[in-house]
Image: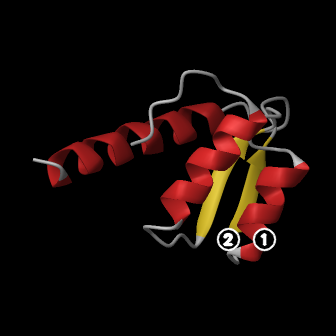
Amino acid sequence: MFPLKVKTADAIYEAMKSLLSTISMISISFETGTEFNNKKVLNLFTSKNIKVIVFNKKIHPNSTMLIERFNKTLRSKITMNNR
């Protein structure tokens, strides 16, 4: 995990760049917030051939719940692997 002091587009870009140097991903899902949904971060995902799925809460109100559940599962798996 990469704890961030700020949730800016540049901070997300640097964290994802670092993460993607150690793991590979097929896809990533997030909401329409600009910290992920911006040209710099999207270009990083494109350069790594990562499929991007952007959820719009107005169109898909349950999407946040799915993403938060995934994040919880991912955090627990990372924690288990770091023991």
Name which residue lies at 54% across and 69% down.
25
Name which residue lies at 26% across and 50% down.
77
Q: Give me the disc on residue 50.
A: 2
Where 34 sits versus 77, above or below?
Answer: above
Q: Residue furthest top?
A: 5
Q: Give me the disc on residue 72.
A: none
Where 38 sits versus 62, above or below?
Answer: below
Name which residue lies at 54% across and 64% down.
20
Q: Quadrant of the N terminus?
A: top left
Name which residue lies at 79% across and 32% down.
33
Q: Nearer the viewer, residue 58 or 12?
A: 12
Q: Residue furthest left?
A: 83
Left or right relative to 57: residue 7: left
- Three-letter code, disc 1: Thr
Where 65 sits versus 82, above or below?
Answer: above
Looking at the image, do the residues carrying marks 2 and 1 touch, with CB atoms under 8 Å apart? yes
- Three-letter code, disc 2: Ile
